[in-house]
Image (cartoon, rainbow, N blue to C red):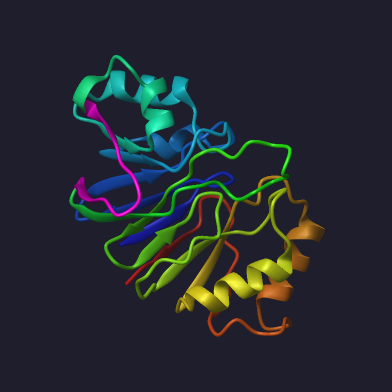
Amino acid sequence: MNLTKFGHACVRVEKDGRRLVVDPGGLTEPAALDGADAILVTHEHFDHFSEERLRRAAESNPALRIWTNASVARQMDGLGTRVTSVGEGDAFTAAGFDVKVHGTWHALIHPDIPRIGNIGFLIDDALFHPGDALTVPDAAIDTLLLPVHGPWSTTGQLIDYVRAVAPRRTCAIHDGALNEVGATMIAGLLGDKGPGTGGRFHRLVAGASIQIG
C-alpha cells in the first residue's frame, strides 16, 4: 500500500489502482478525495468529517461508498446503501481493502464535555487509524497513525500508547493546530531523543507518501 498524508488527520491509501480515504474533514486539502473509491470516517468532529465534501464527492462518483459510525451515518441520510454504519468488532471490504473496526468512544476531553462515538480502522491488517482515541487493537500493527496533538492527550500518554500498541512504525497525524516548534518538540520526544517507544517515528508533511507493508 501507498500512504499519502493530507491535512491534519486525513490520509489516502492506494493499492492496485484503488483509493481509500480516511477522515477527509474541514482541515483537509480537497485533492485528498480526487479519484476516491471509498471513504472511512472515524467520528463527527469537523476536522475529521465534512458533510458538504462527502456529499459532493458522492455526487461526482455514483460508485463511491462510505463507512462510518452511526452518528455520522445519520447525517449522511439520502445516500441509502452507499453509507454503511459500523462499530466495534465489525469487518468489511472497502474498495478491495480489508477493514476491521476497533474502539467505541472519543477520548475524554473533560468530564463536563459529553463524549461522542469514535471508531478506529485497521486496514489490511497493517495500518491503524484510531481517530481521536488511544485505542489499543488486539492485533499486531505495522504502521500506527498517531494523533499527536489534541485537547485530550499529553505527549507522555502518547509515548505509553505507542508502547502498548507496539507498531513497527508510527506516523504523526492530527497535527494541524501545531506550529513548527510544537511539531518538532513532539517529534523529538516520540523519536530518538525521547524515552523510547520501540519503533520508528515519522512526521509526514502534507502530500508526503510512504509504503506500508
Residue 46 falls left or right of residue 32: right
List the single residue furthest toward the front: 111
The correct choice, above or below, for 168 with respect to 138 in the image is below
Residue 173 falls left or right of residue 17: right
The correct choice, above or below, for 137 with respect to 90 in the image is below
Give x and y (percent) for residue 84: 26, 34
Most foreground residue, 212 or 94: 94
Q: Quadrant of the N terminus?
A: bottom left
Most foreground residue, 146 or 201: 146
Is residue 135 within the magenta segment? Answer: no
Task: Classify residue 26 by image quadrant.
Answer: top right
List the single residue furthest toward the top: 78
Q: Quadrant of the C terminus?
A: bottom left
How many numbered discs, if any? 0
Most foreground residue, 65 or 112: 112
Is residue 86 within the magenta segment? Answer: yes
Residue 39 falls left or right of residue 6: left
The stretch in magenta equals 82-95
Please report the residue visible at 56 percent of the width from the left and 73 percent of the height from the top.
Answer: 162
Please report the residue visible at 73 percent of the width from the left and 75 percent of the height from the top.
Answer: 189
Give x and y (percent) for residue 155: 72, 66
Give x and y (percent) for residue 83: 27, 29
Give x and y (percent) for residue 9: 54, 47
Please report the residue visible at 60 percent of the width from the left and 81 percent of the height from the top.
Answer: 197
Please report the residue visible at 49 percent of the width from the left and 27 percent of the height from the top.
Answer: 50
